[in-house]
Image (cartoon, helix red, strand yellow):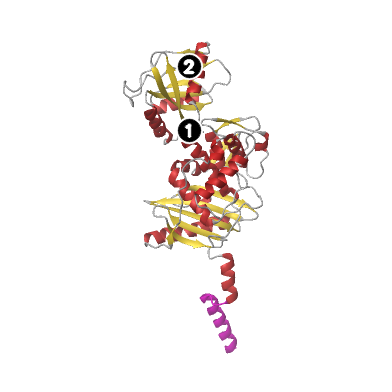
Amino acid sequence: MRTKSRVVFLTMLLVMLGASPVEAAASRATGALGAKSAIAMDLGSGRILYEQNADEQIPPASLTKVLTLYLAFEAMQEKRLSFTEPVLVTPEATVAGGSRMNIKSGERVIVRELMKGIAVASGNDACVALAQHLSGGEDCHPFVAAMNAKARELGMADTVFKNPNGMPADGQLTTARDMLKLSASYLRRFPQALTFHSMTTYVHNNHNHHNANRLLSSYEGVDGLKTGYVRASGYNNVVTAKRGETRVVAVVLGARNAGIRAAVTRQLLDMAFQKVSQGQGIATLEEQKGTGKLPAVLAQGAPRQDPDLKAAQVLADAKAGQLQQAPSAAPPAAATMEEARPAAGLLQRKTAQGAYAIQESSFQSRHKAERRAQHLEKKGLPVKVVVAKLDGKGRFYRVLVGPYANAEDARKTERFLGHGSVTVE
């Protein structure tokens, strides 16, 4: 009896000390965090705080959508795309499987809404629609080629993309380290993207979608980024959280289910913040900044927008009697009389397709108009700058907020701004 007790005691001791070769092998196979691979970094310093099988290739699933949104923001930066630009939804986009935003064939959806659908609803259909739009046709291959070009620029040496949404495809692979490189560059270049990624719900076509990132509402400081799942990879996650001046980015690939994914990510974030506070770190992430430009293969299909062409159309409509101008409003307080004109007043387009916008201000300087637009975008408003040429008075740059489907929604924003005038564009 005494011998049996000793055997039990020694067995338990070996298990506690991790001395069993079988247990050790199993631990290496599953990973200390219960996922196939993981990595975490302090974004400010670039120091890696923890890693586990970080170079193991795994299908990215919907983490792919981070790069899809990255290219969309890059196109906006080059004035090849705008938040309020309408996208015509094709039949090919609507048949995308998996998670969907529920867009409809023939529907026109502005880019801002598609980006919300990608970030929150993980819409595979929205990814196809946006990729087709930027590719300049129904073929997504230019967009996918641009994805792989951008991945190479960022030093994602072990990553290959086959589609814009992460749906299962032979040879579509990434690693936790590569996803960290992508996410770090994304957050540094386009921090405004967190406005979308921090949304917990989103509604389109009467379908209410919930963000699958459970930590948004349960972990202090989490404000993004993206979850994903396909059978070949398991449950994936890229999460960022900020506490004080410290922002951590964490990647978890290959958890067994959504609950374990959330628990493992929480554990990884806890370890990361603790290591930052203790001044610990493993190494510095080897990053490549890339060109900072939209890859040429995609830039060819997404030419720069010509605001003069839009202005010419507005003037043509006015001369044809399609626009009726009301008395002008007072100039906004944010601009002096030398650099800004009064808001244009209430314009009414005599077509059923008209959408309402607010002329918030108007400048003679493009730079000042764009700077004003950026200020308004930080408030979460849909903004665009449109050029108008006035006979004998030169060129002015109108800062428009919108579009809105009806006048009442536009009026609410107008009251929020405290100035401006509602326009039908």
> Residue flagged by tag 2: what amino acid is it?
Leu
Tag 2 secondary structure: strand
Disc 1: which residue = 79
Identity of the residue drawn at 53% across and 30% down? 85
Q: Left of 58 or right of it: where is 288?
A: left
The N terminus: image quadrant: bottom right
Q: Which of 350 and 318 lies nearest the eye of the viewer?
A: 318
Residue 1, relative to residue 92: is it above or below? Answer: below
**Inter-mark Cα distance, 1 to 2:** 26 Å
Residue 230, relative to residue 417: is it above or below? Answer: below
Q: Earlier in the sequence, mark 1 or mark 2?
A: 1
Can residue 327 be seen in the rendering of this structure? yes
User: Is residue 37 in the magenta section?
Assistant: no
Q: Left of 337 or right of it: where is 381?
A: right
> Residue flagged by tag 1: what amino acid is it?
Lys
Disc 2: which residue = 347
